[in-house]
Amino acid sequence: MHRFCVVLALLAALQGLPAVAGDWPQILGPARTGIAAADEKLADRWPEAGPPVRWRREVGAGYAGLAVCGDRAVLFHRQAAEEIVEALDVATGKTLWRSAHATRFRPQVGGGDGPLCTPVVHAGKVITCGAQGVVSCDDLASGRRLWSRATHREFDAPEGYFGAGSTPLVVGAAVIVNVGGRGDAGVVAFDLETGKTLWQRTAEAASYSAPVAVDVGGGPHVLMVARLSCLLIDAATGDVRWKFPFGQRGPTVNAASPVVIGGDRFLVTSAYGVGCVCAAFDRAAAKPVWQGEGPLATQYCTPLLLGDHLYCIDGRDDVPPADLVCVAAATGREAWRERGFGYGTLLAADGKLLAAKTAGELVLLRATPAGVETLARSRPLPGTLRALPALSRGKLYLRDDATLICLDLAP
């Protein structure tokens, strides 16, 4: 009888649990903020050997992170002379379908020859952008290729140092891409259903920063960091509301995504002596509130806005040291700095931070404006971790130059 009562109590408790955590359908998660769904739960500690590995598989070249939607994870990588989109079973890592196109890309400066842009899953479709600017749309259920555009060739866009690296953004029925083409084809919108060009605007060169969607004055807009400028663009028409210089000429990149703060401010940041700008904005203009190289100057780690503070890895991957920092979003004032933390990327879930360091270490942290505590650390892969991790339903999808693993981080 006692055992029966315990079972009944357990069933009653389970019925009161919230629904499982959400998808990770694009770069930096559900809202491109680096923050997981509100009901995502993480264990506070890991076993001595590290988090359990549910499955692993070999992958080709590329620094593109995964997108996860329901029972499917979407991998984008290169093998031999093909860029390949694969839908994987999240339970086993086995391939459900495969779609590919030819590539002959070679980087101008170091790095690899695989794709950099994380897939975008939207309305049952998978949008990818390859290193040579091939923007493709595949059906998520079947893998059938719906349309494809060779943007570098069509819009006369240079390939850049490492190839195309600005992940497309879907706003309504438009797939918006920082193509960097000549002849007012810096930013191009394609119809989600057909791939036809909806509009093309500006002469801005392409960056490696993923744009974000914002609602301004009741209408959808795109906040974008291009090669040398920050712009606000009307998503429906392509009209540029305003722009200001941001970036540095020469062997530099803009790669961190903009961070929207409270709906009427945003932060952009870059390394190479550029620093950051936190500005108030509306449809008419952007006005700096605080700025400089001191608060933040990060190479490609997008800062996370948690409460009223920003958390980021400040510095560069190629020029150490790099510090983990916390700054007040309102003023840019530094709350604390953990020097020599090491470069990498961040995501947040369940009141914790996950840092994937490029040197190969995965670190679980509890960070507040008062300080930071290391909860657990592990080295699950032997290679360099540059691809952004994806977190969905307690599973972390992490890849280095040769291997993709699925880690169980749930309590």
Image (cartoon, rainbow, N blue to C red):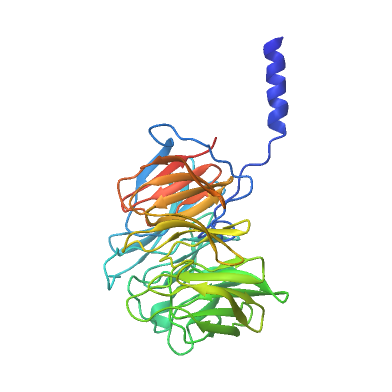
| 215 vs 347, nearest the viewer | 347
| 207 vs 46, nearest the viewer | 46
Residue 388 visible here = no
Q: Quadrant of residue 248?
A: bottom left
User: What is the quadrant of the N terminus in the image?
Assistant: top right
Q: How many marks?
A: 0
Horizontal relation, residue 95 to residue 244: left or right: left
Q: Please tell me which residue is depicted at 45% across the width and 90% down the height of the picture.
A: 183
The picture places residue 243, in percent across and down from the top left corner, at 55, 83
| 148 vs 316, nearest the viewer | 316
User: What is the quadrant of the C terminus in the image?
Assistant: top right
The picture places residue 299, in percent across and down from the top left corner, at 40, 66
Q: Please tell me which residue is depicted at 54% across the width and 42% down the height of the picture.
A: 394
Horizontal relation, residue 3 to residue 323: left or right: right
* Outermost residue, top side: 1
Residue 148, placed above or below residue 287: above
Residue 345 visible here = yes
* Outermost residue, bottom side: 183
Residue 97, placed above or below residue 331: above
| 257 vs 182, nearest the viewer | 257
The picture places residue 309, in percent across and down from the top left corner, at 58, 58
Residue 13, placed above or below residue 97: above
The picture places residue 231, in percent across and down from the top left corner, at 55, 80
